[in-house]
Image (cartoon, rainbow, N blue to C red):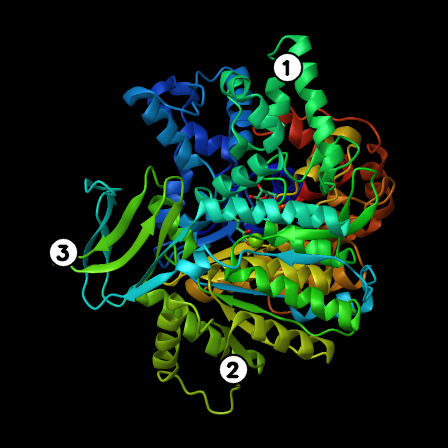
Amino acid sequence: MSKILYTLTDEAPFLATASFLPIVQAYAGTAGVDVQTRDISLAARILAQFNDLLPAEQRVADDLRELGELAKTPEANIIKLPNISASVPQLKAAIAELQAKGYALPDYVDEPQGEREKDIKARYAKAMGSAVNPVLREGNSDRRAPKAVKAYARKHPHRMGKWEYGSKSHVAHMEAGDFYGSEQSYTMVNPGMLRIEYTSVTGSSFPLRAPVKVQAGEVIDAAVMDVAALAAFVDAQIADAKARGVLFSLHLKATMMKVSDPILFGIVVSRFYAPVLEKHPRTMAEIGFDPNNGIGDLYAKLGQLPEAQRMGIEADIAALYAQRPQLAMVNSDKGITNLHVPSDVIVDASMPAMIRDSGKMWNAAGELQDTKAVIPDRNYAGIYQAVIDDCREHGAFDPATMGSVPNVGLMAQAAEEYGSHDKTFKIAGDGTVRVIDEHGTVLLQHPVKAGDIWRMCQTKDAPIRDWVKLAVSRARLSNTPVVFWLDPRRDHDRGLTAKVAMYLNEHDTTGLDISIMSPIRAMRHSLKRIREGLDTIAATGNVLRDYLTDLFPIMELGTSAKMLSIVPLMNGGGLFETGAGGSAPKHVQQFVAEDYLRWDSLGEFLALAASFEHLANTTGNARAQVLADALDAANAKFLDEDRSPGRKLGTIDNRGSHFYIALYWAQALAEQTADAELAAKFAPLAEALAGNEAKIVEELIAVQGKPVDIGGYYQPEMAKLSAAMRPSATLNAALATLAG
Ligand SMILES: NC(=O)C1=CN([C@@H]2O[C@H](COP(=O)(O)OP(=O)(O)OC[C@H]3O[C@@H](n4cnc5c(N)ncnc54)[C@H](OP(=O)(O)O)[C@@H]3O)[C@@H](O)[C@H]2O)C=CC1
Ligand SMILES: O=C(O)CCC(=O)C(=O)O
Ligand SMILES: [Mg+2]
């Protein structure tokens, strides 16, 4: 039997799965396709780390590891929904929920003492941050808005905030001392093992980790963030935001860049709140406040203090707020600021949202206001300033007429920053970090000071070659120009540029328009074309892949949920991601409060069609192709009829959108002529669904408006969730007829 593996993840996409998966399984079964689930949620990832401590009935299989192995084989056909890349506060919350459910998990220890605690922390570290994507993404990324989606966006343009020339919003980045300024890169000639060695000013040396295996042709790079320079930069930006009367906001990727960015986040928190933290150093140590977890960590821990002491510190914070620039808010009603939780503001989604909202963010009074967006490192900060400049000059983009920027992203085999997690270090003392080959040759070296963050990345040759091939093939298939976004001032990008030039020679590029530009030039070029209604493929490294595949979809389509996101795995399998965005925690909050789920599953629908098509191509299952074609047609109708969830109670939500895709898919299957038996099987279902449309919609809407209990956040109870997500008895009964 042909097999598709559908991932169970977290938050809104997981809730959606409880409604959508039964439909998928019922339809797939008619083509002999077995749709199995694999649990890669944060809860499952945590439990899988502690099987040795759990009783047999609580142990879970390590599904992520299984999928990671499978992704390296031609048989892989995986549908991957967004999952939580957990920050420490999210990790702690998930552990607490699981402990309350009776799992005897050890507590998370911030500062481990002794071997046992170090082991516990190391296990949790494996479940944390971007733990899934680098494992499953054994291929490069192809993300784009399918034609039908772009046509939909043109027909139903979403709201875009107006831009004014006088906008004071801007991006602030360092001018020196950042990763960008210190990057060194080297392309390996031979395979080997590299030592990463720290030498203190007094001359003692030790390795920072076990030697790193490298392949011939691999591009390695390393860079260091000078934290003293960062602190001085942040102080200057705080003063500047105050002087200009704009909000202060910070945009990092503390989830995906799970080692370096929480530290950067902590430094900004420490500087912003410095007068209070420096006034109460002993108390801060006593309560164990960790700025890397955000100022929310302080608020949570103040409760441990005697009331008078707590009120004193709260008064000091209030007094500080009066002197500081206003902070951008995540939730002004609840007083949650941009510096509360490191995972609340994630640059790929937060900067596009700001740009979509006229360059403004929310202030404490719940109003939109111009903002300083602090993005410390220069590697990619400049692209956002280029968008802001363009919007100030020419006004907001018009979704009804604008062109598109599809992305071909280099990410396979933990390319670039994805692979840096186990090679990122907070440096203990002043000295030097060197990368040394087996012959003792120093390939890269940096002077460092205590507290600096040093990190190394690896990009293997085969993924680079595959990336160039994918870019050329997308250019050919879509007849669209390609720009490789590579910065001639970056050592790493120069290494990549040489390889791009070399690998382009392997392809017939006659008639194709292929160029290489620095990110800022590439952005200006792409934006100019976008305003002319023209498309330009961006072939980028991993971080720009992440940034651009939220930025352009959010501008073009209103959300990255409507993206097609395919990862052609290098060994022939297929990984079909759903959309390009996150797991939308605020959708869960709305769902439990009022039984309304805003999540747009279009990304799931698009991924599923691509997955069936891949299955048909690789296994010869002709019915899978019929399902794929019918789902394509259903997706087009779904868009045409605008059946995505609304935002307000009383309209169809995620569940209603699943009913409509089931209806249109069944109708397309009943009408197709390629497989008469299948058509006959779906005809009665199509009729039942169409005939009961009003009743089903009514049953789905009737439940809205009351709180709903799903028995957990990180590990909802399946029975409760399924009951909540499948409230239409009529729809459920109709689907059940397919099984016969
Ligand atoms: N591939 C993956 O596994 C990814 C995982 N993540 C993880 O997801 C979590 C949340 O991150 P983040 O992306 O910043 O925040 P959100 O998930 O909250 O996404 C930001 C905004 O995008 C819009 N959005 C995204 N997807 C949908 C959808 N399907 N339907 C409707 N709206 C959607 C909403 O915007 P609006 O309200 O403006 O409509 C939403 O508020 C984190 O844990 C993060 O690490 C993040 C990115 C990718
Ligand atoms: O891996 C992650 O943490 C997030 C990935 C992401 O945002 C993306 O791939 O667009
Ligand atoms: Mg992203």
Camera-nearest residue between 177 and 459 = 177
Compared with residue 427, is residue 581 higher up or lower down, i.e. above or below?
below
Q: Residues within 10 Å of mark 3 (few under 14, many from 20)?
A: few
Looking at the rendered structure, the secondary structure element under dot 2 is helix
Q: Which residue is mark 3?
A: 438
Camera-nearest residue between 535 and 698 = 535
Q: Earlier in the sequence, mark 2 or mark 1?
A: 1
> For the point 24% across and 65% down, which residue is it?
188
In the rendered structure, the answer to whether residue 222 lies left or right of residue 489 reads left
Compared with residue 707, is residue 612 higher up or lower down, i.e. above or below?
below
Q: Inspect the image, locate mark 2, and give the three-letter code of the amino acid beneath it.
A: Arg
**Mark 3 close to ligand 2, CB under 8 Å:** no
In the rendered structure, the answer to whether residue 172 lies left or right of residue 443 reads right
In the rendered structure, the answer to whether residue 599 lies left or right of residue 26 reads right
Picture coordinates of residue 438, whole percent (x, y): 14, 56
Picture coordinates of residue 530, whole percent (x, y): 69, 75
Q: How far apart are labels 2 and 3 at the CA level?
A: 43 Å
Q: Which residue is mark 2?
A: 476
> For the point 18% across and 66% down, which residue is it?
190
Q: Quadrant of the C terminus?
A: top right
> For the point 64% across and 60% down, which residue is it?
551
Q: Inspect the image, locate mark 3, and give the three-letter code of the amino acid beneath it.
A: Glu
Q: Which mark is residue 303?
A: 1
Which of label 2 and label 1 is nearer to you?
Answer: 1
